[in-house]
Image (tube, rainbow, N blue to C red):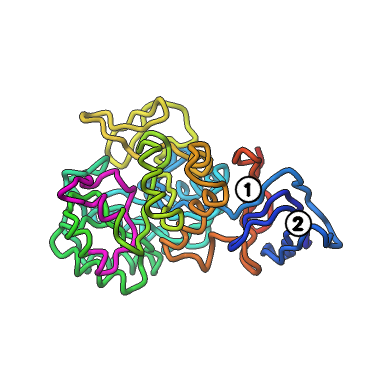
């Protein structure tokens, strides 16, 4: 049955409206926004002191609720899919870490064979973080799988995934990286660059070849200095690129986040979690791929020296709240950085990222302090605090 949401504020695609009504049709899509002085006839769901925002889009997440993409199991994907609703996420890119060709191919086959069967947040494609990295900035990636990019491998993975491989990260200094970026980006797949000690010129060459995203900016990349801008300098200064940012207060200092957001503007900063399986779980021992991880104090770190950060336990609803609490952006911009901008970066705006007539009614309810209260999928409440 068609109903109308009444709320204090609506974060629409191009405007933020105070008050009014938003139609949700009987087939689970958004209808029209109606101003406050034009009360519609029909069922009204009242959120008078709440804010309505598009469902969040997490384009870089490895695991949550004890499950991981590297489990190579559709049951794990479903576990993650349903758990993400507790984070306000309604669309996502399941993200691998480095692994063997065969393991990654098996993961692609799972998505190819089960596409559209997830029960919670909607899978919009697969994100490959690796294996085409270099060791100096390996982070929590296993260097035994690092190698030069291969179009033949990519083509096989994409075939196994039945076209659903949506994003892949490469290190610009790897042999053949520029050609790989050029060919892959021509297919419509987003190419990101990261886990790299590349020079500014090497990074720039990949951007000019078609790379459009910097993977978790500042983390796992050559830093900015006054004579060699490095990967960070490229992320900050090149035009028409989108910079991922992990805003958990551990991966980057909030003032560093301010510098990047001020320079790039919120329109080009993608809030991601890089969450691993310990998200929504108690502190303790976990695994990230084949590597043991210790979770505690709000961080996930490798158990072996030098104890690198191993992803995060951040939830995307926490990230959009943090950047507001840190006085970096307005709530409107924060919501955009957690929904529309990720969708733009992954080239999935046809499916998610905004409240628009005719789109699936995937949305969240926030209070005035940016706390998540409820998550809707296709117009149906699926999670409530």
**Mark sitting on residue 91:** none
Residue 71 location, x and y as percent? 37, 46
Q: Residue 255 magenta-drawn? A: no
Q: Is residue 125 left or right of residue 46?
A: left
Examine the residues drawn in magenta and state their main secondary structure.
loop
Considering every residue shown, the one lying at the far left of the view is: 175
- Residue placed farthest to the right in the image? 41
In the rendered image, the vertical position of residue 155 relative to residue 105, given as above or below: below
Q: Position of residue 18 (x, y in %)?
A: 71, 53
SS for callout 1: strand
Residue 20 bears which disc, if any? Answer: 2
Cα distance in 3D space between marks 1 and 2: 20 Å
- What residue is shown with label 1? 375
Between marks 1 and 2 in the image, the one whose residue lies nearer the viewer: 2
Residue 214, given in percent of the width and then of the height, sits at 32, 55
Q: What residue do we see at 39% from left, 43% from top?
A: 257
Q: Residues within 10 Å of mark 1 (few under 14, many from 20)?
A: many
Q: Residue 3's x, y, as percent?
A: 78, 59
* Magenta span of residues: 206-235
- Above or below for 283 versus 123: above
């Amino acid at each position: 049955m068609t109903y109308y949401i009444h709320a204090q504020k609506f974060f629409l695609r191009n405007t933020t409206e105070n008050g009014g009504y938003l139609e949700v049709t009987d087939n689970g899509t958004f209808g029209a926004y109606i101003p406050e002085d034009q009360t519609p006839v029909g069922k009204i769901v009242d959120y008078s002191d709440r804010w309505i925002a598009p469902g969040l889009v997490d384009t870089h997440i490895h695991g949550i609720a004890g499950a991981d993409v590297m489990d190579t199991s559709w049951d794990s994907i479903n576990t993650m899919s349903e758990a993400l609703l507790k984070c306000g996420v309604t669309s996502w890119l399941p993200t691998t870490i480095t692994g063997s060709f065969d393991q990654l191919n098996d993961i692609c086959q799972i998505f190819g064979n089960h596409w559209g069967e997830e029960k919670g947040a909607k899978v919009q494609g697969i994100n490959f973080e690796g294996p085409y990295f270099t060791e100096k900035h390996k982070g929590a990636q296993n260097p035994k799988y690092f190698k030069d990019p291969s179009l033949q491998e990519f083509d096989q993975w994409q075939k196994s995934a039945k076209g659903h491989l949506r994003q892949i990260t490469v290190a610009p200094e790897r042999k053949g990286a520029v050609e790989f970026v050029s060919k892959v980006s021509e297919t419509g797949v987003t190419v990101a660059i990261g886990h790299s000690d590349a020079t500014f010129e090497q990074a720039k060459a990949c951007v000019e070849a078609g790379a459009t995203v910097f993977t978790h900016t500042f983390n796992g990349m050559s830093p900015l200095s006054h004579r060699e801008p490095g990967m960070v300098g490229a992320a900050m200064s090149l035009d028409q690129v989108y910079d991922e940012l992990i805003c958990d207060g551990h991966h980057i200092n909030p003032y560093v986040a301010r510098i990047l957001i001020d320079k790039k503007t919120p329109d080009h900063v993608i809030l991601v979690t890089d969450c691993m399986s310990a998200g929504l779980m108690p502190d303790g021992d976990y695994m990230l791929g084949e590597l043991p991880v210790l979770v505690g104090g709000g961080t996930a770190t490798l158990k072996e020296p030098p104890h690198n950060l191993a992803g995060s336990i951040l939830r995307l609803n926490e990230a959009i709240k943090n950047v507001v609490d840190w006085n970096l952006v307005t709530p409107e911009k924060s919501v955009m950085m957690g929904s529309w901008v990720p969708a733009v970066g992954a080239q999935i705006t046809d499916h998610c990222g905004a409240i628009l007539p005719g789109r699936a009614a995937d949305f969240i309810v926030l209070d005035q302090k940016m706390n998540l209260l409820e998550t809707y999928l296709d117009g149906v409440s699926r999670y409530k605090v």
